Structures are given as structure tokens and as C-alpha cells.
Amino acid sequence: MKKSKILIVEDEAGIRETWNLMLSHFDFSAHTAANGLEAVRIIEQYPIDVIITDLQMPVKDGFFVLEYIKSNNLDIITWVCSGQLSPNTVLDDYNIDKIILKPFSMLDKVHELISIISENNAN
């Protein structure tokens, strides 16, 4: 089975590093970015299989990342992770596979991710 490449886009360093540690424990190759601009630069350099992005971040937000994925028709499993989503937040325009509301159990989400990736690799 190929090693999946995951990009974590999160402005909170503690959350970003916890994702990174947890994913490396399960033998994923993880990249991290503190904002949407960093994320797009990583996507342009490396083949990314999964992206987990916050929405509200400085410099460029998660919508910048989602728009980049959509505009370039990239086949990336996309999870949005947010502390709050207002009723006016429009996510229907993007191909989002999962919305995670903070707080959440990171271990549960990693296990879910393992299951999804294993399923995709089997197909």
C-alpha cells in the first residue's frame, strides 16, 4: 500500500503539530501549513492525497485553499475542520468530503481517515 500524503492546514501551532505527530505515528507522510498561502505552495510542490484545512486563518484562509483545489480540478480528499460555521457559510460550491467541528477526538478522525484511505487504495 502506498504511503498517503496528507496536508494539515491550521493556524494554531498546537493543533497542527498534534495532527502531525498523530499521523506520523500511523505512518502517514504529513505536511503542515499555517495558512492557505503556505498550503497552496505545498500542493504545487508535492502530490497530496488528503487535505485537512481550517477555514479561518491569517494571510489566506481555508476558502483560498478550497478554491485552488476546485479551480485546478484536483482529486484530493478534502476535510474542513472549523471551530464554528455560521449559517451563512457556503461550502456547497466545493467538493468537501467531510466537515469536522472543533472540538473533536483526533484519534477517532485518524482512524476514520485510515479507513477511507484503505478503501480508496483497494479500489
Image (spheres, rainbow, N blue to C red):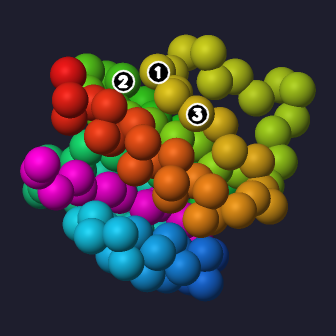
Q: Where 18 sits versus 83, above or below?
A: below
For label 1, count other residues whose C-alpha is less than 10 Å away and answer few (under 14), some (14-19) or many (20+): some
Q: Return the residue at label 3.
A: 98
Disc 2: which residue: 70
Which disc is residue 95 wearing? 1
**Magenta part of the chain:** 1-11
Find out whether residue 9 is within the magenta segment.
Answer: yes
Is disc 3 surrounded by few (<14), some (14 to 19) or many (20+) residues within 10 Å?
Answer: few
Of discs 1 and 3, which sits in the foreground? 3
Under circle 3, the secondary element is strand
Residue 103 in view here? yes
Q: Label 1, label 3: how many angstroms apart (C-alpha)?
A: 9 Å
Residue contact between numbered discs 3 and 2, judged by CB atoms under 8 Å: no
The C terminus lies in quadrant: top left
Is residue 7 toward the left or the right of residue 60 in the image? Answer: left
Circle 1 — which element? loop
> Would residue 103 be found to the left or right of residue 44 on screen?
right
Left or right of 91 in this view: 23 = left
Mark count:
3
